[in-house]
Amino acid sequence: MTEMATASRSSTNHLLRRDVRFLGNILGEVLVHQGGRELLDHVEKIRETSKALRAEFVPELYEEFVNTITGLEPGVRHLVIRAFAIYFQLVNIAEQNHRIRRKRDYERSAGEAVQPGSIESAIVELKNKNLPLNEVQELLSGISLELVMTAHPTEAMRRAVLDVHKRIANEMMELDNPSLTYRERERLREQLRNEVLTLWQTDELRDRKPTVIDEVRNGMYFFHETLFNVLPDVYDELERCLAKYYPEQKWHVPTYLRFGTWIGGDRDGNPSVTADITWRTLNMQRNLVIHKYETLLKALMRKMSFSTTIVKVNPELLESIEQEREAVELRTVDRWTNDHEPYRIKITYMIQKLQNMREEKLKGTSQRYHQVSEFIADLQLIDRSLRHHYADFVADTYLKKLIRQVELFGFYLAALDVRQHSQEHENAMTEVLAKAGVTDRYNELGEEEKIELLHGLLSDSRPLLHATASLSEGAKECLEVYRTIHRAQEEFGESCITTYLISMTRGASDLLEVMVFAKEAGLVRRTPEGKLVSSIQSAPLFETIDDLHAAPAIMKTLFDLPVYREAVAARGDMHEIMLGYSDSNKDGGMVTANWELRVALNKITETAGDYGVKLKFFHGRGGALGRGGMPLNRSILAQPPHTIGAGIKITEQGEVLTSRYSMEGIAYRSLEQATSALVKAAYLAKHPTLDQTADAQWEEILPSISETAQTKYQDLIFRDPGFMTFFKESTPLSEVGELNIGSRPSKRKNSERFEDLRAIPWVFAWTQSRYLLPAWYAAGTAFEKYVAGDPAKLETLRRMYREYSFFATLVDNLQMALAKADLLIARQYADMIKDDEIRTRIFTLVQEEYDLTKRILLEITGQEEILDNVPVIQESIRLRNPYVDPLSYLQVQLLSELRQRRDEGEDDTELLREVLLTINGIAAGLRNTG
C-alpha cells in the first residue's frame, strides 16, 4: 500500500510519517505477494477516489467510487476489506510507538525541564505552592485510585492478532536504534515483512464466543506483559520526585494505585459466571503471581553471590536459614550446596515455600507461606542484611522493587469484585425466607416492610437456614457465592474480594439482602465482645437517571439503620458507591447523563458527610464517548474534587485495556498522568480555588439545559414509534451480536425492548454506522433553547466554556463526537430502512439536530471548525476518514445483501464473515467500538 502512508501526513511528525510509510510499503508488498498487482491496484484506486471525494465532493466521482465498490467480485472484495482493516491496525501501532518516542525525545531534550502531566510536574506544583511536608504526607496517605478490568465485550480483535501487533511494535521501536548496521536494518525489515504476512494470514475473527475463563486469561495477559513491571515503576518515580523536592523525608509512598478486576466475578446477566468459576479465577490469578515471584527470586538468586568468607551478614539471616532447614523440605527445588552463600540458600527455601502454596495437603503447615506478610518479612530480612554489610546499592536496585510488587499484588494479583443483579437477590431471599418459615411473600412486601424485616435479620446472630436446606439451583448458587467469598478470603487473603456490587439498585433493601446473605456465610458477624465485623461491603450501582435521583435518599435510609451503620464503621467508615455512565447515557442522553451524574456525586457526598462516612466512588466508564469514555487523567480531573473522599475506582475494559496497557511505555505514561491528576485533585479538594467556588453560579443554569436535552432525547428514543425500526435497520446491531467478542449476552433478557438492550451494543452499532448518536444527540436543542437568540445568554455559555471545567469538558466531548460522526456516510446506512416514512422523517430529525449542535458549539467555543482547539486529533480524524469510508460503503452493501438472503430464509456464512471483517476494520479505523 505504497501511497497509503499519506493518511498520516504531518509536517511536525516526520518520524510518524516515516513509520506509516514504511509499514504501508511492507503491506503493499504483502498484498502483491498474496493477491497479485491487481489487488493492490484495486485498493489504491478506492483509496485515491475516497480521498479525492473528501477533498471535494463531485457527483460523477462519487458515482464512480460507488460503482467500483459495488462492482468488486466477492473474492476480491474480501481481500480489499482485509487490506484496509490491516492498514488501520498498522497505523495504530505506528501511532502508539510514536507516543512512546515523543516522551523519550522530550526527556532526552528537555534537560531539567519538567514534562506537563508528569508526576514531577504535580510535585513541583505542590512545592511551588509552599505546601509543607506534613500536608504532603497527609495528601498522599489519603489518595487512592483503583483501575478495574472488566470483561465487557468491546475488544473486537483476537489475542492472536494483538500478539502479532506487539511483535511489530517492538521491531518498529528497534528501527530507532542509531547503532544498527545496514544489514541489521535489512534483517529487521525482513522480520517485519514476515510479521505483516503473518497478520495477513491470521484470522481476525473468533470462531466461537470466549468462555469466562478465556476472558480471565485475557485480563491476566496485561498483568503478565506490562502491569507487574510498570506499576512499581510509577511508585518509584513518585518517590524519586518526593525525595528531590522534599529531601528531609525518607519516602515509602503508601499504596495508592492498584488494579482490580471483575472478570470471573461479574455475574450480572452472565449465567456462565458461577461460584466455581470465581474460585478458579482466584486460583489462576494466584498461580500467575506466584510464578512471577518465583521468576524474580531465581533471577535474584543469580545476583546474590555474597560470601560469608568476605562479608559479615546479619545474624538474623543465618538464624532464619537454620529454622527453614528444620521446617521446610526441599522437594522441587535443588539445595544450594555452597554454605558460604547464605542469600542463595535463603532464596532456595523461599522458592520452595512459594511452590508449596499450590499443594492443598501442605495447607496449615510451616512448609508454605500463608500470609503475604510472611513473604514480605523474608524479603525485608534479606534487605536488612544487605544493608548490614553495606550492599545498599544492591538492596535499592533489586529488593525495593520486588517488595513493592508483593505489596501491590499480594498472593491474589488483583482484587476481584463480585457483581449481581438486584432481582437475583430478591428471588433467592424470597425462597430462603419461605424455607426458614419467616414469610412466604417476601417479594410482595413494600420497601419499608422489607427494610424492617432485613434489618431485624441482620441484627440477629442466628443463621436463617441449616447448611443442608433444600433450595432451588438458583438460590443455592446465590448462597454459594458468599460461601466462596468467605473461603477465598481465608485462602488468598481478606483483600482478594471485599466488594459486592449490586446492579440495578432501586432501594435500600437491595443492599440489605446482600448483607443478610453475607451474614449467613460468616462474612458479617459479631465477636464475643459484641463488636460487628464485616469483611465484605454491599455497594450499590446507580445506573439510570431515576436511580441517580433516588440515590441520596437510599443511602440516607441505610445510614439511619443502626446495624448497617455499624457495618460501615467496621469498614473504616468508608462506603463504596458505583455510578453507571453507560445506562444513564442510554437512558437520558449525553448532556443529561453528565449533569445528573455530577448532581448525584455532590448530593450523595453531602448525605454521607452528614453521617461521618467517607465515600469511594466507582465510575463505570466505557471506552466510547457515549459511555463516558475519556483519557484516564481527564476522567479523574472531571470529578468535583471534594467527591474523591476515600478514593476513586474506574472501569477499564476491552479496547481501552489494549490501547493503554499492551505496551510498557504507554502503560507507564497513562499511569503517570493518572497519578499526577490524582495528586492535583487531592490538593484541590483541600484548597478549593476561586474557580471551584464560582461554579455554583453556572450550576443554576444547567438544570434547565439538562431538562430540555432529556426531553428532546427521549422524544426520539422512547416516544417515537418508528425509532427502534430506524435503529435496528440502519445499524449493524444484530450483526455486532455475532462478532463473538464476549461471553455475556448482548441483552439482559431475551427481549426486543429497548430497556433490555445493553449499552455496549447500543453504542457499538451507532459508532459503526457513523452516527455516534448517543454521544451528541439533543445537545444542540438544549443549548439553542437556553440562548433563545439572546446575545447575553450566548455570552454566558461562552464564559462557562472558558471558566467552568465541567462545561468545558462536556463541550469538548461533544466536539469529539461530532468530529467522528459523518452523516453523509450515515445516510447510506439509513437507505437500508424499508419504511420510507420512518427513514425520511427520523433521518431528517437527526440531520437537523447534528447541524444545530455543530453551529451552536462553534458559537460557544468561538472556533471556525469543530476541534480547532485540538488540532492533532482534528487532523488525525480528518486523515483517517477517507480510509474508513470504503469500509463503511462496503459494510452497507454487505449488510443489504446478507439481510435480503436472511429475509428469503437463507444464510451465507461468507457474507456474514465479510460483514464482521468490516466491523473490525471500522473499529480499528475509528479507534472505537463500544
Image (cartoon, rainbow, N blue to C red):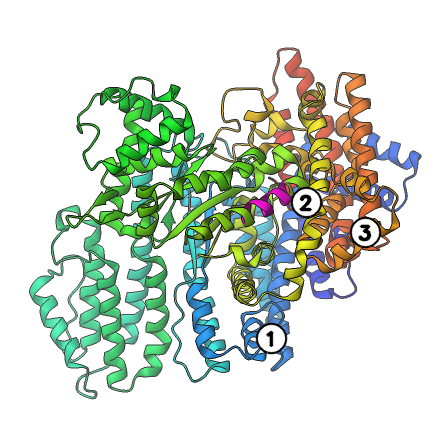
Residue topped by disc 1: 107
Residue type highlighted by circle 2 = Gly
Position above or below: 818 against 208? below
Which of disc 2 and disc 3 is earlier in sequence?
A: 3
User: Percent position (x, y) of residue 48?
Assistant: 82, 45
Residue topped by disc 3: 860
Residue sitting at the far bottom: 310
Label annotation for residue 925: 2
Q: CA distance from mark 1 to mark 3?
A: 37 Å
Q: Is residue 595 magenta?
A: yes
Kind of element beneath mark 1: helix
Position above or below: 357 against 46? below
Quick check: 215 left or right of 845? left
Task: Report how many numbered discs are placed on residues in the image.
Answer: 3
Is residue 840 visible from the viewing direction of this image?
yes
Q: Quadrant of the C terminus?
A: top right
Residue sitting at the far left: 326
